[in-house]
Each structure stands twice: as structure tokens, then as C-alpha cells.
Image (spheres, rainbow, N blue to C red):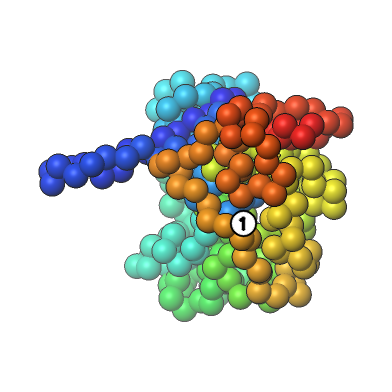
Amino acid sequence: RGLKKHFILGGGFLGGKTSRVRAVENMSFDVPEGASVGLVGESGCGKSTVSRAVLRLVEPDEGTVTFNGTDVRAASPAQMRKLRQKMQFIFQDPYSSLNTRRTIRQTLEEPLKVHRMGSPAERRERVEAILPEVGLPQEALDRYPHEFSGGQRQRIGIARALVLEPELVVADEPVSALDVSVQAQILRLLDDLRQRRTLSFLFVSHDLGVIRHFCDVTCVMYLGHLIEYGPTEEILDDPAHPYTMLLRESSPVPDPTSRIANAKMTGEIPSPANPPTGCPFHTRCPRATPECKEVMPKMKEIAPGRQVACHLY
Ligand code: SF4
Ligand code: MG
């Protein structure tokens, strides 16, 4: 609720000018149990910052994060350790997120040790049981990350997140570093896992095809603001916000397995260090009016479960 995060850049010992980057402004949304919620928008819109703030990998300036009734930001270190077991992160780059000097067995056992889960024998069993779930052979356990392809490494990253049996998985662009054919395999794997376990997802992507495939509900972000929210199909088939309309036009193919290069949206994204007044999208919006330059539109419900922040509604 009300998440806000600004970063201060520059300054330092050279005495340069600092600037305030308004990464996230007033973001509120829910991730219902068992649902997959997408955060979509162009790069720099704040979606990664939101996803990290949920797990306290970055500390928001304002706002609250509540997980199963627990205030995440107020959690003590001991409570936080328990929460972290239940909320796991899958990173974009499966390679840099794995320790190259550790075997896969060591990599997968590490979180269990950190969270003091099970005896050594139980940990071993758990690690061995997770491999077939992510489609890797047992031989993988005694090998090192460099011996695997990008897709296999992401399977290892997924296994590392799942070995703790989390309830919420936050995935930041988990397939965007992979070849298109491999993307589809990893998305299918995540789908399977979601059905087999009761997992909720917060799924960050700039790719509407991926979002359509994976997310029940979608939050569209622009310059740190939530600008449209609702069931994914409705939002992508019948977008209400002019930005969502343009985003959809610039990525016309709805299936990640047959994707062609995305066309670019016209006009520059304003800098989050110097955001426009009024509606953040007014500098690129084909339907902007004088009011849009002055007044920030509020989120309004336009249909059950659908919200949009735009003066047209
Ligand atoms: Fe466009 Fe105005 Fe709506 Fe913003 S509020 S999206 S500028 S029409
Ligand atoms: Mg990002």
C-alpha cells in the first residue's frame, strides 16, 4: 500500500549535483493467494524496484507491505528470516545469481542451511527431490554452473527458490535473458509448478506476450505510477489507458513462442529524475488535454476489478 521509493544519484566526494530519481510513486496492489500478478511497463518504470521492495531487498521510503497479515517492513531480523523462507526471488540473470565455485548441490543446500531446515539427511533428500520437479537430472547435483546452458541455469535458480517451499515467488524478468524457444519452456515449467504447488507469483516483465501467458492479473506501470490494473485478458484485449493501448500496439504478437522484434513506441520516456507535471503520460499521450498537464489523474474503478488512472474516465 502506498509504496514509494526515490533514489538519490550523483553527489559524492567530487561534489557533483545530486538528482532525485522518482522510481516508484504511490503503488498499491494485492497478490491474492494462488494468483499470478504481473507488473509490466517499459524499462525504468519502477517495476523491478517494486518487486524488490516487496521482499525488502530495497527499503521503500513510504508505504506498507503485508504478507499473510504480517507487516514485512516492521519485521524483526528473526521474523524476517521466517518471512524470507515464504517469499523467494527468481532473478533475471540465472548466471550471475549463481555462485560459480559451488556445485549445484551446495547451491541448493545453502538456503536450507541458512534457514536451519531439516537434518543433513533431510536436506539432502529435499535437494534430490527438487531436481525432477524443475526438469534436471540427478547428475546435475555434482556439477558447476558453467556446465549448464542458460535455460538449465534458470531451472537451477527456480529450484533454489522452491527448495524452501515458499508461498510467494517474486520473479523479475525470469525469462528475458533466455532464447525465445527456451523462454517458452521455462514459462511452461513455472506454470506446472504453480499448478502443482500453491504458489502465488509477482511476475515482472516488459513483455506483454509473457505477461499474457503467465499472469491472471496485471498492473501496468508508467514512470513509477500504477496506471492500469485488472484481469490480464481484459487489459490486453481491451486496454483502457492510452499508454496500455500504445504498449500493446508496439508488441503485437501475443505468444512468446512466435515473437517477432518489438516495434518501439514513439516519443522518449521522460526521465524519472524530472517527471512531467499532471498525468505522467501526457508528454506522449495522443489524447492529452490541457487538464492532463496540470492534474494527476487518480485511480478509478471502471468495471469490477478494473482500475485506470486517466482523465478520460
Ligand atoms: Fe492521456 Fe490525459 Fe489520460 Fe494521461 S490523463 S493518459 S494524458 S488522456
Ligand atoms: Mg528491471
The residue that disc 1 covers is 206
Q: Is residue 273 above or below residue 97?
A: above
Viewer-side residue, 297 vs 131: 297
Q: Is residue 154 above or below residue 81?
A: below
Q: Is residue 55 visible?
A: no
Quadrant containing the C terminus is: top right
Label 1 sits on a secondary structure element that is: loop
**Residue 212 screen position, x and y as percent:** 77, 56
Residue at 53% in and 56% down: 268
* Beta carbon at label 1 within 8 Å of ligand 2: yes
Left or right, 61 with respect to 125, comes to: left
Viewer-side residue, 307 vs 204: 307
Quadrant containing the N terminus is: top right
Viewer-side residue, 231 vs 20: 20
Residue at 45% in and 71% down: 145
**Residue 151 screen position, x and y as percent:** 59, 71
Left or right, 193 with respect to 66, comes to: right
**Residue 47 screen position, x and y as percent:** 56, 45
Q: Image quarter for residue 181?
A: bottom right
Left or right, 288 with respect to 120, comes to: right
Q: Is residue 238 visible?
A: yes
Q: How many marks?
A: 1
How packed is label 1: few (under 14 Cα within 10 Å), some, or many (20 or more)?
Answer: many
Residue at 85% in and 48% down: 238
Specify the amino acid type for callout 1.
His
Residue at 47% in and 78% down: 147
Furthest-front residue in this view? 290
